[in-house]
Amino acid sequence: MDIFELTKQLMSIHSVSGEEEAVGFWLRDFLESLGWTVELQKVSENQNNVIAYLNDKPRVWFSTHMDTVPPFIPPTEDDEKIYGRGSCDAKGIIAAQITAAEELRKQRIEDIGLLYTVEEERSSNGARAANEHLLAAKCEYMINGEPTDNELAIGSKGSFRLKIKTTGKAAHSAYPEMGDSAIETLLDILDDIRHTKFPSDEFFGETTVNIGVIEGGVALNVIPPKAEASLLIRLTTPRAPIEEALHSVIRGRGEIEVLSCSEPVRMLEVDGFKQKTVRFTTDIPYLTNWGQPLLLGPGSILVAHTKDEFVMKRDLERAVELYTQLAVWLLGT
Ligand SMILES: [Zn+2]
């Protein structure tokens, strides 16, 4: 199957996060038909990571995720592009990695493995489970795929998700002096956060804050007793100094509930490849047992997760060359 057919075949199987079972079964059957040894690693009742290899302790692995964000958008194409959900994030990448792996096999290089996870777009629970797999310890380099425009990403920002919650005292809105507005307190805190310069990092760049969701209050005529805001902070430093800065901004007026956190990661630099840092997070922070991470993939993160998602066909072909070169270089040193 050529790389474009393989991309479209994978895209045609619905696999929004939580519903990756069918695509996992298809990949298992396909890789087995090519002669790979394939394990399905159970992550939940109907979610399995796909782990495939040619020998019993590969040193270099390719990996990315099988799940997509909703909604499902079936594949279409023209001469230059493949359009639809998963074209660049990340089914085109799976196709490019498998094609590169088969290319390496033709050169009698079989010291390679393939890891395809579930749940990357939500909790990275697939990667967390994969991190416990016994083969991880034997892996020296993990080439993870996400859309990086085929440039080698040498750093990715972390992601810190949290809620700020405020409580007040409900009262009749005609008698505000009897109550205490949780929403006004929250607005004050958020305004202070918007005017705070958080620590940044020379390598990773600026720490940025998105106030993504605000909720609170009960009715127009009631002083609101509760409010909360959900924030996503793109980390360029460890979490601790940012959390400290938040506490000193909040000054006891509200509480922080941490939802999740992944720290910024530095990836391996390789001479001869175009390099950059990226702002998004990946499965890599959860694959710490899988050797040194690298990150590269065809397509642009700017179209991933949009209704216009696409990948250039020539970028898929170029990714095959780059993945092949990377694996050869890593195995040779
Ligand atoms: Zn992705």
Image (cartoon, grey):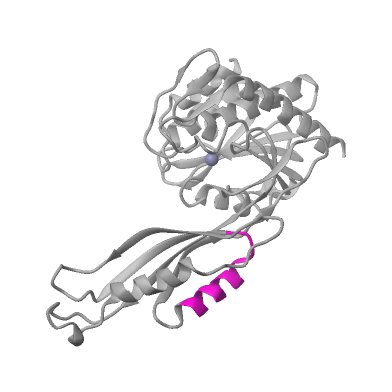
Along the horizontal axis of the image, is 112 left or right of 132? right
- Residue sitting at x 54%, y 61%: 261
From the image, which quarter does the N terminus lie in?
top right
User: Image height check: is 266 above or below 3?
Assistant: below
Principal secondary structure, stretch drawn in magenta: helix
Does the magenta run of residues contain 252?
no
The residues colored magenta run 235-249
The residue located at (20%, 86%) in the rendering is 177
Residue 20 in the image, given as x and y percentages of width and height: 44, 37
Tell me, yes or no, if residue 208 can be seen here. Answer: yes
Q: Position of residue 53 (x, y in %)?
A: 68, 33
Circle count: 0
Q: Nearer the viewer, residue 155 or 332?
A: 155
Q: Quadrant of residue 71?
A: top left
The answer to whether residue 166 is left or right of residue 179 is right
Residue at (46% x, 66% y) in the render: 194
Q: Quadrant of the C terminus?
A: top right
Please name the residue shown 35% across and 72% down the image. Answer: 186
88 and 139: which one is in front? Answer: 88
In the rendered image of this protein, does residue 217 appear above or below residue 34? below
Report x, y in % for residue 116.
57, 38
**Residue 244 belongs to magenta span:** yes
Q: Is residue 285 above or below residue 40?
A: below
Q: Is residue 331 left or right of residue 163?
A: right
Percent position of residue 128, x then y: 56, 53
Q: Residue furthest top?
A: 79
**Of residues 315 and 249, which is closer to you in this image?**
249
In this view, 132 is above or below 198 = above
